[in-house]
Amino acid sequence: ACAYKFAPDRAETRVKDITIQVGRTGALTPVAELEPVFLAGTTVKRATLHNAEEIARKDVRVGDAVLVEKAGEIIPAVVAVLVGQRPPGSEPYVFPRHCPVCQTAAVRGEGEVVWRCPNPLCPEKIRRRIEHFTSKGAMDIEGLGEEMVALLLEKGLIRTTPDIYRLKVGDLLPLKKSG
């Protein structure tokens, strides 16, 4: 039996896949796609794996049984691999050396652990920068969340942050915000 099994702030689940999230600074962050598990009041389907070195140190693999906990009771993170439950034939995860969105070769600065997409025109970096700019912690533009930013980019109504200020009511009226 696992020593963590009954801890309310940790739960056991399985890694279905490892995907790479591209942030506004180009940071390539690995994310464990999990079998859903109830943890600290919510159903968790994804958990951060932090960076390539952390995946290698913990030897996290697709198919692994893992323990997850919420760091600071907010962000789910994989804290341990239950190696004794590893499926036979599993392979170590190979961190990608290219941005999964624009395919630009990833770079890592000397002494850094984070791999980054250096392409300033990477569509995902642009989307994340605009989302950050419009977020509550920055400009706090009401009604301009992730979904609306994605829609405006998809429709070609914005390409950069300053484009937000060029939008007209007539540009927005035909858009239907779901939800």
Image (spheres, grey):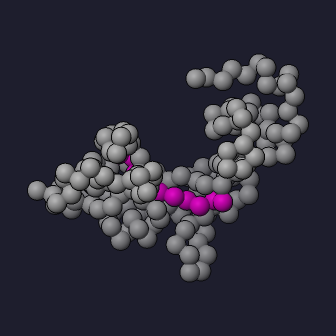
Query: Does residue 63 appear in the picture of this structure?
Result: no
Main SS, magenta residues: strand
Tell me: 161 left or right of 136: right
The percent position of residue 86, horizontal first and vertical second, equals: 21, 57
Picture coordinates of residue 53, whole percent (x, y)? 43, 70
Which of the 4 quarters of the picture holds residue 105?
bottom right
Q: Quadrant of the C terminus?
A: top right
Q: Is residue 127 left or right of residue 159?
A: left
Residue 64 versus residue 90: which sits nearer the camera? 64
**Seen in the image, is 87 located left or right of residue 173?**
left
Q: Residue at x 60, y 49 (%)?
A: 101
Query: Of 118 and 37, which appears nearest the observer?
Result: 37
- Quadrant in which the N terminus appears: bottom left
Is residue 48 among what the camera can see?
yes
Up the image or down, 32 lies above or below 107; here it is above
Residue 48 location (% of width, % of height): 44, 55
